[in-house]
Image (tube, grey):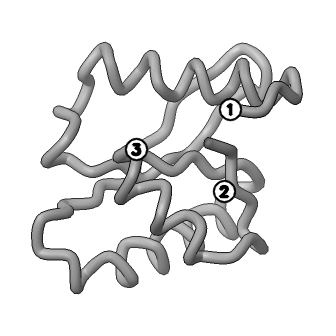
């Protein structure tokens, strides 16, 4: 898994949602939200995926926006929070996953 940037290939973020249920996005708010909305639009054909945009403060990047599948994670779920935290830690330290 990785943290995506607004200029990254959207197909990779779609794969992350389908595989892991989450795609974290780093950067400034306006481009990140535009990327997240585009990601949600690209997920529309997948009837079993219910994407939601969210935000979490994290220690290394300061904050991350992310899109998650609400059919896989409940809003506010501790497992979801931990997944975002783990992404922040792994990707900040440059450790491949």
Q: Quadrant of residue 9?
A: bottom right
Local packing at callout 3 (Cα closer than 10 Å; few below 14, some 14-19, many 20+) is some
- On the image, the x and y values in percent for residue 47 come to 11, 74
Please state, as top left, top right, bottom left or bottom right, where the C terminus lies in the image: top right
Q: Vertical placement of 86 versus 53: above or below?
A: above
Q: Quadrant of residue 20?
A: top left
Please state, as top left, top right, bottom left or bottom right, where the N terminus lies in the image: top right
Indicate the secondary structure of the residue bearing disc 3: helix
Indicate the secondary structure of the residue bearing disc 1: loop
| Residue occupying image coordinates x 71% and y 48% | 26
Report the side of 41 relative to 2 (left or right). left
Viewer-side label of 2, 3: 3
Return the residue at label 2.
Answer: 29
Return the residue at label 1.
Answer: 97
Report the side of 7 relative to 68 (left or right). right
CB of mark 1 within 8 Å of CB of mark 3? no
Q: Mark 1 and mark 3: span between their CA atoms? A: 12 Å
Viewer-side label of 2, 1: 1
Q: Vertical placement of 56 versus 22: above or below?
A: above
Say whether disc 2 or disc 3 marks the residue closer to the N-terminus.
3
Indicate the secondary structure of the residue bearing disc 2: helix
Q: Which of these two is toward me, 48 or 31? A: 48
Return the residue at label 3.
Answer: 20
Q: Mark 2 and mark 1: span between their CA atoms? A: 26 Å
Local packing at callout 1 (Cα closer than 10 Å; few below 14, some 14-19, many 20+) is few
- On the image, the x and y values in percent for residue 48 come to 12, 65
Q: Vertical placement of 56 versus 93: above or below?
A: below
Q: Mark 2 and mark 3: span between their CA atoms? A: 23 Å
Report the side of 40 relative to 64 (left or right). left
- On the image, the x and y values in percent for residue 21 come to 35, 46
Count of labels shown? 3
| Residue occupying image coordinates x 72% and y 14% | 59
């Amino acid at each position: 898994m990785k943290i995506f940037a607004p200029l990254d290939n959207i197909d990779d973020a779609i794969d992350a949602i389908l595989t892991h249920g989450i795609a974290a996005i780093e950067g400034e708010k306006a481009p990140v939200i535009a990327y997240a909305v585009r990601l949600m639009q690209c997920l529309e054909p997948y009837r079993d995926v219910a994407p939601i945009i969210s935000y979490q403060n994290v220690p290394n990047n300061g904050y991350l926006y992310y899109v998650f599948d609400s059919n896989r994670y409940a809003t506010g779920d501790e497992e979801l929070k931990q997944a975002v935290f783990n992404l922040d830690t792994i990707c900040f330290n440059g450790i491949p996953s």
